[in-house]
Image: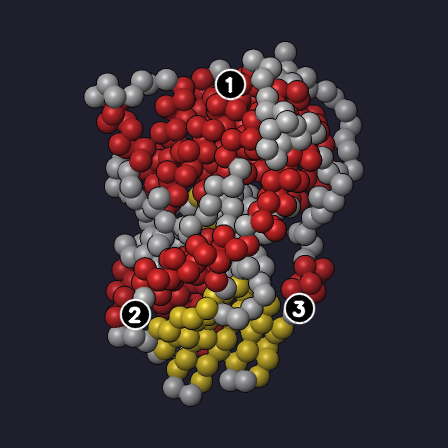
Amino acid sequence: MKDISSTAGNPLWSEFIKAVKKEVVPALGCTEPISLALAAAIAAHWLAKPVERIEAKVSANLMKNGMGVTVPGTGETGLYIAVAVGALGGDPEGQLEVLKNLTPKQVEAGKRMVAENLVQLTIADVPNTLYSEARVIHGEEWVRVCIADTHTRVVHIEKNGKVIFTAEPQQALADDSTEYSLTGVRTRDVYDFAIQAPLAMISFIREAATMNCSLSDSGMSGQYGLNVGAIMSRQIEQGLLSDGLLTQILMRTAAASDARMGGATQPAMTNSGSGNQGIAATLPVVVVGEHVKASEEELTRALMLSHMMAIYIHDKLPRLSALCAVTTASMGAAAGMAWLLKGNYETVSMALSNMIGDVAGMICDGASNSCAIKVSTSAIAAYKAVLMALEGTRVTKSEGIVADDVDQSIANLCELACLGMVQTDEQILRIMLNKIN
């Protein structure tokens, strides 16, 4: 029997609900090129004339994450096509679904604009790890839009040298009623919220399962990315893989990432600004839920535990860094799977410790089709961590960056990413830029 109590609530719960509703949202395509496309769409809206040229700038981290990913509906990769179609056909109010209504005519016009060298792209000299800027031009007229710190936060709009809107990032945060604070929160607080909160309060998280499972089904068609999920399905038929629970977790999670990174025109439910993180926090939990025949309430609580735990961990990280955050999202999945299989906090805590002791430090070398491999690797690590926890085995304080206290282990991991991997991030970008120069 799961330890579901009927307590009346907790002051932290409203912050958790705000956090999940802000961080778990639909996005069509990889969120870094989509952020630039949104800036271009808003700029084109203010220009109110046909866009003839585009000058774009992005932060180094956004450049890294936008170079190799397929832009939905275009069949092409990278930031050039993203900003072009954003300017020509993007919905300025579409947020992370800015390219949802692209037409073939707009896509072809965007491709011509790129081919004719009418799109310029450079790295912006800014302190923000997440920054996108689009300047759209018609004759002597122009509009510049800047987005900073999160994928959709507009901080500056300027037309023909006249400032229409500007805000310091700190001011934008203060004015945003959706902002939340996780100061002082611990893993036990997240666990208690997911397991004890009234079901009606958290039932909206089921949409993550609906949306990301649909994306996984598309990925299994074998039409997208590296076809990691579809290849595994064929290998089951050939007898090269057994069709067990681990393989299903691996295959279905990877397939969703295949579709998302390969340009499928379907949204993913994100987590902390990333579709792959949303996929990693959702699919393993769904697959285990199906395996144990979880009730609707049990699956809902496990999904909320997974997504909120992923948000809690990622809240201690930069928005973009050298750390592949699919690993931290999969720590959320480990928590959700552990609860479905054992139903207590101790097992959840041990699973998290095992994950940190296993895949801590996997690098992010840009968003691309190969993300599906990292997603599948993290899903394997999550389930392996759970299997160990079910037997009462966990990585201890004597080993690596793991501490006795799981919250300290999380803090150690995030300190590694924030302080220890800065030079790694710079070197990754240098390597990637050298490939195209």
Q: Secondary structure at mark 2?
A: helix
Residue 74, compared with residue 233, is above or below; it is below
**How many numbered dots are placed on residues in this image?**
3
| Tags 2 and 1 touching, CB below 8 Å | no
Q: Secondary structure at mark 3?
A: loop
| Tags 1 and 3 touching, CB below 8 Å | no
Query: Does label 2 or label 1 sit earlier along the sequence?
Result: 2
Q: Secondary structure at mark 1?
A: helix
Task: Residue at 56%, 68% (x, y): give it.
Answer: 126
Q: Marks 2 and 1, how far apart in space?
A: 50 Å
Task: Residue at 37%, 73% (x, y): give it.
Answer: 120
Residue farthest toward the top in the current orientation of the protein: 1
Depth check, front residue: 157 or 102: 157
Residue 66, compared with residue 390, is above or below; it is below
User: Which residue is tagged 2?
Assistant: 114
Is residue 313 visible in this depiction of the protein? no
Q: Residues within 10 Å of mark 1 (few under 14, many from 20)?
A: some
The quadrant the N terminus occupies is top right
Task: Residue at 65%, 64% (x, y): give it.
Answer: 169
Place residue 48 in its image quadrant.
bottom left
Q: Position of residue 319 (x, y in %)?
A: 56, 52
User: Which residue is tagged 1?
Assistant: 387
User: Which residue is tagged 3?
Assistant: 168
